[in-house]
Image (tube, rainbow, N blue to C red):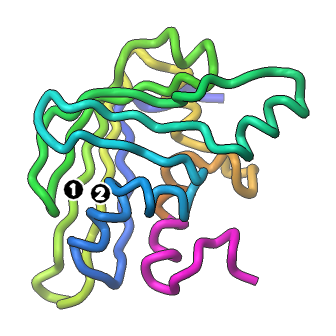
Amino acid sequence: MSEPQTTQVYRVWIKTTPEKIWTAITDPEWTVKYGYAAPSFYELRPGGAFRAAANEGMHAYAKENGFTIPDTIGDGEVIEVDPPRLLKQTWRMLMDPTTAAEPFTTLTYEIEELKSQPGVCRLTITHELTGAPATATMVAGSPLDEAGGGGWAWMLSDLKSLLETGAAMSDVG
């Protein structure tokens, strides 16, 4: 298996507004509706804190499988913020001791409304992962995993489904 790339870029086109994407990324009432359903809290200013909290399902899964996870599963600091177009932050995953021991990485969200396609936005996530190989592997996801190991590709797909249909992928069916 090859080493994960130190800079990973993920992109999705969503039929919605930049403001709705921004809210879905930065508002804990929205972050619990897609992906891994972990509420994320931001102080939306340079130097502001970022924190992602474990949800009850994560704690229950850990307990059933004989391990614990911290209440705060991710943390970082806001570097740059320009609502609803740009959010740049440091980012570290604390759920696993290996990723928690790695340095902070840099995560950038860019939201662009397409001039050629009104009502459609391109959301790009760029994750700079230098010095963090375990985190790089985790966020790259596994093409063989149907959900939990999907990384950023899973998160973006689920966010797109939620914003376009009103239901996350796990809710459809």
Q: Is residue 166 a member of the stretch shown in magenta? A: yes
Identify the mark nearer the N-term, 2 or 1: 1
Compared to residue 69, the image places residue 158 above or below, namely below
Which residue is drawn at the image coordinates 26% and 51% (left, top)? Answer: 109
Which quarter of the rendered picture does the C terminus lie within?
A: bottom right
Q: Which residue is located at x 26 percent, y 63 percent?
A: 22
Residue at image mark 1: 110
139 and 101: which one is in front? 101
Instruction: Say the numbered circle drawn on residue 124.
Output: 2
Judge from the rendering whether residue 75 lies leftward or rightward of residue 22; answer left or right: right
Contact (CB < 8 A) between labels 2 and 1? yes
Q: Position of residue 26 (x, y in %)?
A: 32, 54
| Residue sitting at x 31%, y 82% | 16
Q: What's the magenta region? A: 157-173
Between 106 and 47, the one nearer to me in the picture = 47
Percent position (x, y) of residue 58?
A: 71, 40
